[in-house]
Image (cartoon, rainbow, N blue to C red):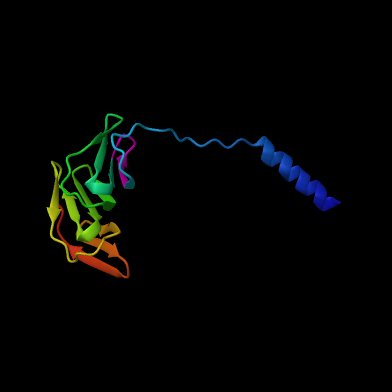
Amino acid sequence: MKINYVSLLFIVILNSVSVQAQWHLEKCPTKNNLNAISLIDDNSGWIVGEEGTILFKSDGIWKAYKKSTNQDLNSIVMIDNKNGWAVGDKGTIVRYNGNHWELHNSPTNKNLLSVSFFYMEKTFLIRHLHVYMGTQRIS
């Protein structure tokens, strides 16, 4: 009997607590699937997706950015508002230099799934069963 009262009390408490997520839908300027996001702060960030889709958020609005590739982009990391990397299918690597996204040489022609930074001079690229580490000074 004691267990039933505890269970009932738990159910009553659970039902009386209202959990509300703070999610809201934002307008998106593309119909392509989006694969990854990297936010710089509350009001700015970048998204990458299918067919080289790159979106950026400025002044609270997502805007399409000029493509530097038609390959699907799978991952993005922004170090700050002037330095970022994105990777994608067929070894695609693009870098944001503060003005535009530019293609970079790749160590592979296989799909790259993720990109991350250990610190400003080391980059890690991941594809199925392989990890690549590169060094390039970001200035």
- Looking at the picture, how far across and down is residue 13, in whole percent? 70, 40
Compared with 108, 114 (above or below) is above
Residue at image position (77%, 44%) is 8
Hey, which residue is sitting farthest bottom in the picture? Answer: 129
Q: Which quadrant of the structure image shows residue 41? A: top left
Main SS, magenta residues: strand
139 or 60: nearer the viewer: 60
Vertical order, 68 against 23 (above or below): below
Q: Is residue 49 left or right of residue 106?
A: right
Count the labels in the image. 0
Q: Nearer the viewer, residue 22 or 75?
A: 75
Q: Position of residue 65 (x, y in %)?
A: 20, 38
Compared with 87, 24 (above or below) is above
Residue at 17% in and 40% down = 66
At a point 24% along the width and 44% down the height, the residue shown is: 53
In the rendered image, residue 38 lying in the magenta stretch gets the answer: yes
Q: Is residue 19 left or right of residue 9?
A: left
- Residue 7 drawn at (x, y percent): 76, 48
Residue 27 coordinates in the image, percent (x, y): 34, 31
Q: Residue at x 22, y 42 (%)?
A: 81
Residue interval drawn in magenta:
36-45
Residue 96 in the magenta stretch? The answer is no
In front here: 78 or 128?
128
Q: Residue furthest right?
A: 1
